Structures are given as structure tokens and as C-alpha cells.
Image: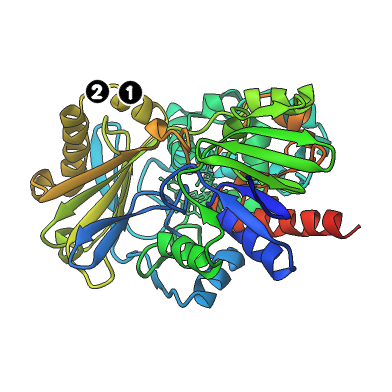
């Protein structure tokens, strides 16, 4: 006999768990079907001993992300500021320099060039309707070009374009050529501004969660009281009359409505009976994930702090191009979080693990000197290899996807509803957006169940 509930939720990430919580509070019975043997999806803690963890997935929150702060606080999880004291390192075009504040010490002409390009992006982003980017003025023109082609016309120097590429890698795990300009503008507006996506203090990297972001998912799941079924990847969704049946490798489940919270490309790998309309299937054919390997490099202590450095570094080294101090709140061990993103992740993913580790450590030595060359430990997670994510941080929208298929992102198909951070209109791609999408879909489903 299939287990049954009013609503089946596919995926126990922050979106699925939030949807389940909202639906249960509204009085509906819910079952959450999760492919992995853990909850959290793109948030995951890794034990490093001494009762401490590192986060191998999403970790930061910042101003404007009210939903994630509120959820964590409600579950008794405190935040602490990302270490942001001291100078930052920029290693670019073969030269290393340090700088205080937000503006690197580079050629003022290049700074003016990049500043002007960013100001143009910010102004264009403000005009994009976040709930329907395809209705923006000149949407087809914006969506018909990539950030790369736009940058070629709107910047005067190669260095400005390289800096813009670094920002794209850091924000999307992708290269400017992967991204529709309209998508970059939508994403910026959904976060408030492009600058917010980049900043530490005052931006999306401002705060961390004590005990790790995955604790939020763990506690949220625990509060749901046994409705999450782990190790249950949904392979098939069948709609017959007023009933929807989800087939998993661990059995069948029945409901009146089903909410799919996976990233769109994974929703596209589920078999649907009857077949989904072409507009939805073609959307999921066009929504790949970003390319990221998250690495954590351990030292006995955060030695860079004593040298007046914040631990934040960026540059064009062949290893890590974005680095943060990720030391636990008590200051030990010292941890540098080094991201491999976009083309770096794609290239280094194909190398042996030892080569990859060496590339990361070598780049840290370029940023922070010889002490960084002798780490005490190293961990990495290649999200491109994660079967139930397929990459991160989120879905990339290339040219023509928003304008041709954007309407299919949230539009339900019969009793099948869609959620997940990709469907959010505020903080899309972030933990906060995932929660917002869970709340939105729960209201949508609840309304359907009560008519
Ligand atoms: C390395 C990394 C760094 C990041 N950094 C940040 C950050 O600092 N701040 C921030 O806010 N965000 C960050 N993010 C993004 C953030 O983690 C995500 O936006 C958010 O967690 C997405 O939640 P979700 O519930 O929408 O999707 P997911 O977490 O992807 O949840 C979907 C769930 O569905 C499951 N699933 C997939 N297919 C099936 C199936 N067929 N059947 C059943 N279950 C299935 C998956 O296992 C998963 O648990 C980062 C992500 C990564 C990976």
C-alpha cells in the first residue's frame, strides 16, 4: 500500500522543508521525499572534529535576507560576522597588492571603467520586474546577449573585463559568456543590487551561522515530526484523476498535490505521466547549473590575521580566485575557504585530486605568502559531481531562456507545483530565496486544496 498525504514534497532542501512546515501548519498532511540520505540539499556541514564543522555548501547570509535570519533565529541558531577586518589581497596581472575598504588599488582608469560599467548594470537591473523579467522593456534585446558580449561593448579595458569575469565567477559559478545579460540583471535586482551580491559586510557574505547553515535544515526537519523520507529519489510522477502518485526507489506515495523543489534540470529528469507540456520540458532542457568546487584549507591558526590581512583575496591565479577567512567563531583552526568557479572548476575537476589540491595551495601561497603553502589539512566538495544537485550555486539562464521559457518556471501543471530557490523573486539562488519559494508554493497549494 502506498503511503498517502494531502501533499507530497519532492526534496528536503530549505525550500521543501519550508513548504512542508507551512503546509502542515495550514492543517494539511505532508510527506517529504528526499533522494539523499540527509536533509539540506545544497547546505551541508562536514565534521572537522572537536565538535566543529565546516560548511561545504551555502553558508552566508546578509542584509535583506530576512527569511533566513528569521528561520534560524526561530530554531535557536545564532549568527556571527564573517571575519572582515584588515586588508584584502589582490593578485592580478602578475602583481600582488593589498588594499583596505572596498576598492582595490589598481590603475584609476581601469577603476573608472569598471565603476561605470557597474553603474550601468545597476541602473538597468532596477528596471527589471523580478516576478516577470520577460516583460521588461527591451527584454528580448537584453536576453539576446551575454554578459560577455555586453562587457565587450561597455568596458574599455581588458582588465575591467577580467574583474567583471571574477565577479561573475564568484556570484554564479560561471563565466560571463554563460550568462544572459537579462539573467544577470534579474539576479541583481532580486538581491537588491549587484553590489550586494559581492560585498562581505553590508552584502550577501556578511554573516555566518553558529553550528553551520545545515543545522537550520536539520532542526527544521526535526520539527516536522517524521514526515521526511530519506533515500527516496522520485523517478516518476503520475497524475490519474484527482490523485498524484510519486514513484521512488523506496516505494510509492500518493497525494492530491505534489510540489517539486529540485533545481529545474533535475525536475526535468523525472518521468511524468501524462507527459509535461513542451513549454515546461523545454525550460528544463535549458537550465544548467553553475560549476563550483568548494575547498577548505586548514592551518594551525589564522596567521594572516596577525599580518593585518582579512583572509579575503581575489585574483587571476590558476588556482583559487576567491578566498575568505572561514575560521570557526572561536578562532581555531585557521581556515581559508577557497572557491574554484566557472572555467577553473571545469578545468580542475578533470585533474587528479592531488593536482587540484596543489593548485589551490599554490594560489593561497601567492595571496598569503609561504605559510599558506604548508596547510595542516584540506577538504573539497566538487558540486559538479553531486548527483542530486548537478552543480551550484544555482541555475544559469543563458540567452533567450527567460524571454522564451521564464513563464514556465512557477506555472503549475495540473496538481504539480514548482518551488526551489530558482523560482524565487527575491534572493533567487540563495538560501533566503529557497525559503521564500517554499512559503509561496505552500500558499499556492493550500489555496488549491481549499477551493
Ligand atoms: C558551494 C555552495 C555555496 C553556496 N553559498 C551560498 C551562500 O553563502 N549563501 C546562500 O544564501 N546560498 C548559497 N548557496 C546556495 C544555496 O545553498 C541554495 O540556494 C539553497 O540551499 C537551495 O535550496 P533549495 O531547497 O531551493 O534547493 P536544494 O537545496 O537543491 O534542495 C533540493 C533537494 O531535492 C533533492 N532532490 C533532487 N532530486 C530529487 C529527486 N528526484 N527526488 C527526491 N529528491 C530530490 C536534493 O537532494 C535536495 O535535497 C550555495 C550553494 C552551494 C552549493
Left or right of 319 on screen, residue 184: right
Expressed as whole percent of the image width and height from the top left, the position of residue 115 reads 54, 44
Q: Quadrant of residue 367?
A: top left
Mark 1 lies on a secondary structure that is: helix
Residues packed near mark 2 inside 10 Å, few (<14), some (14 to 19) or many (20 plus): few
Vertical side of 356 occupied by 64: above or below: below
Q: Which of 360 and 119 is in front in this view?
A: 360
Expressed as whole percent of the image width and height from the top left, the position of residue 384 reads 41, 31
Q: Residue 347 carries which label?
A: 1
Q: Mark 2 points at which residue?
A: 351
Residue at the extreme front of the image, as rendered: 1
Residue 12 visible somewhere in the drawing: yes
Residue 130 visible somewhere in the drawing: no
Mark 2 lies on a secondary structure that is: loop
Mark 1 vs ligand 1: CB below 8 Å? no
Left or right of 293 on screen, residue 182: right
Q: Nearer the viewer, residue 333 or 373?
A: 333
| Circle 1 or circle 2, nearest the eye | 2
Check the image and tell me how it is coloured. rainbow
Residue at the extreme right of the image, as rendered: 451
Vertical side of 179 occupied by 245: above or below: below
Vertical side of 87 occupied by 352: above or below: above
Q: Quadrant of residue 281?
A: top right
Residues packed near mark 1 inside 10 Å, few (<14), some (14 to 19) or many (20 plus): few
Q: Which mark is residue 182?
A: none
Expressed as whole percent of the image width and height from the top left, the position of residue 131 reads 77, 47
Amino acid at each position: 500500500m502506498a503511503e498517502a498525504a494531502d501533499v507530497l514534497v519532492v526534496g528536503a532542501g530549505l525550500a521543501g522543508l519550508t513548504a512542508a512546515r507551512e503546509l502542515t501548519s495550514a492543517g494539511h498532511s505532508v510527506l517529504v521525499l528526499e533522494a539523499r540520505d540527509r536533509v539540506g540539499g545544497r547546505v551541508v556541514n562536514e565534521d572537522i572534529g572537536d565538535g566543529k564543522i565546516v560548511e561545504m555548501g551555502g553558508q552566508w547570509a546578509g542584509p535583506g535576507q530576512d527569511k533566513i535570519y528569521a528561520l534560524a533565529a526561530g530554531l535557536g541558531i545564532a549568527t556571527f560576522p564573517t571575519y572582515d577586518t584588515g586588508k584584502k589581497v589582490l593578485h592580478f596581472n602578475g602583481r600582488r597588492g593589498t588594499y583596505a575598504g572596498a576598492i582595490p588599488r589598481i590603475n584609476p582608469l581601469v577603476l573608472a571603467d569598471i565603476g561605470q560599467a557597474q553603474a550601468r548594470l545597476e541602473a538597468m537591473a532596477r528596471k527589471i520586474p523580478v516576478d516577470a523579467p520577460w516583460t521588461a522593456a527591451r527584454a528580448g534585446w537584453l536576453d539576446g546577449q551575454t554578459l560577455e558580449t555586453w562587457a565587450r561593448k561597455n568596458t574599455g579595458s581588458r582588465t575591467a573585463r577580467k574583474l567583471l569575469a571574477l565577479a561573475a565567477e564568484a556570484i554564479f559559478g560561471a563565466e560571463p559568456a554563460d550568462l544572459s545579460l537579462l539573467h544577470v540583471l534579474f539576479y541583481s535586482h532580486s538581491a537588491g543590487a549587484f553590489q550586494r551580491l559581492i560585498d562581505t559586510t553590508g552584502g550577501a557574505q556578511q554573516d555566518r551561522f553558529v553550528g553551520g547553515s545545515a543545522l537550520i535544515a536539520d532542526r527544521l526537519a526535526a520539527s516536522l515530526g517524521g514526515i521526511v523520507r530519506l533515500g527516496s529519489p522520485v523517478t516518476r510522477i503520475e497524475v490519474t484523476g484527482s490523485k498524484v502518485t510519486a514513484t521512488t526507489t523506496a516505494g510509492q506515495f500518493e497525494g492530491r498535490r505534489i510540489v517539486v523543489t529540485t533545481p529545474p534540470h533535475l525536475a526535468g529528469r523525472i518521468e511524468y505521466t501524462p507527459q509535461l507540456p513542451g513549454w515546461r520540458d523545454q525550460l528544463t532542457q535549458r537550465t544548467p547549473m553553475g560549476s563550483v568546487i568548494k575547498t577548505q584549507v586548514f592551518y594551525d591558526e589564522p596567521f594572516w590575521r596577525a599580518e593585518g590581512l582579512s583572509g579575503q583575496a581575489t585574483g587571476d591565479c590558476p588556482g583559487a580566485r576567491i578566498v575568505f577567512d572561514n575560521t570557526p567563531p572561536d578562532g581555531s583552526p585557521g581556515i581559508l575557504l577557497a572557491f574554484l568557479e566557472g572555467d577553473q572548476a571545469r578545468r580542475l575537476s578533470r585533474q587528479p585530486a592531488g593536482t587540484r589540491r596543489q593548485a589551490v595551495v599554490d594560489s593561497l601561497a601567492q595571496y598569503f605568502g609561504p605559510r599558506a603553502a604548508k596547510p595542516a589539512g584540506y577538504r573539497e566538495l566538487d558540486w559538479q559531481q553531486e548527483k542530486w544537485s548537478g552543480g551550484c550555486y544555482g541555475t544559469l539562464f543563458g540567452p533567450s531562456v527567460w524571454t522564451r521559457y521564464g513563464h514556465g518556471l512557477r506555472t503549475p501543471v495540473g496538481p504539480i507545483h514548482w518551488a526551489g530557490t530558482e523560482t524565487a523573486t527575491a534572493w533567487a539562488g540563495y538560501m533566503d530565496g529557497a525559503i521564500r519559494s517554499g512559503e509561496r508554493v505552500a500558499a499556492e497549494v493550500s489555496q488549491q486544496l481549499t477551493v
